[in-house]
Amino acid sequence: MHDSSKVQAIKEKMVRGGQADRTVRRARILALAKGFRGRSKNCYSIAIRRVHKALQYQYVSRRLKKREMRSLWISRINIATREHNVNYSKFVNQMAQYNVQLNRKMLSELAIHEPRSFKALAELAKSRLQDGLLAAI
């Protein structure tokens, strides 16, 4: 029975967080705060709040980046389509009608790097718009 109580005491020490755990946790927080200014980079109580807020900003910014990139692609497509006398909304609508399954990122890349290919798509959209107007008359 004496041996089992020693084993139990060792297990309790392993489960509980002690000095080593605290040191590791503090070191991790201070490593994340490394680029901060003032006491917030080396004072734990301030650093932990700043790190927590920084991680929140990171989380939000990852989503904002996606939104901003999509709006950039849309702006680029809009500029490129207006060069061919078609506006963005009609262009995208006609691409959907023709079942051209290029996303906005790829359309933007085509507009920048492959202007002739993009011109062909714009002409396709324009011809379809004209066909629709003639059919309506």
Image (cartoon, rainbow, N blue to C red):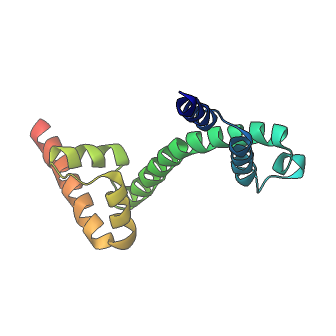
Whole-percent x, y for residue 16 in the image = 64, 32
Using the rendered image of the protein, determine whether residue 33 is visible from the camera's viewpoint.
Answer: yes
Residue, far left: 135
In percent of width and height, residue 35 lies at 77, 57
Q: Image height check: is 133 above or below 74? A: above
Number of marks drawn: 0
The residue positioned 48% from the left and 44% from the top of the image is 67
- Image check: 71 left or right of 110? right
Task: Locate the C terminus and report the quarter of the image it occupies.
Answer: top left
Residue lying farthest to the right in this orientation: 38
Task: Pick the residue in front: 11 or 72.
Answer: 11
- Above or below residue 17? Residue 43 is below
Residue 84 in which image quadrant: bottom left
Residue beneath the point at 72% across and 43% down: 51
Residue 97 lies, in percent from the top left, at: 16, 44
Can residue 137 be seen here? The reply is: no
Q: In this view, does 25 lie to the left or right of 125?
A: right
92 vs 34, left or right, is left
Residue 102, percent across and down?
25, 54
Task: Look at 76% across and 36% down and name the residue there.
Answer: 49
Which one is in front, 83 or 12?
A: 12
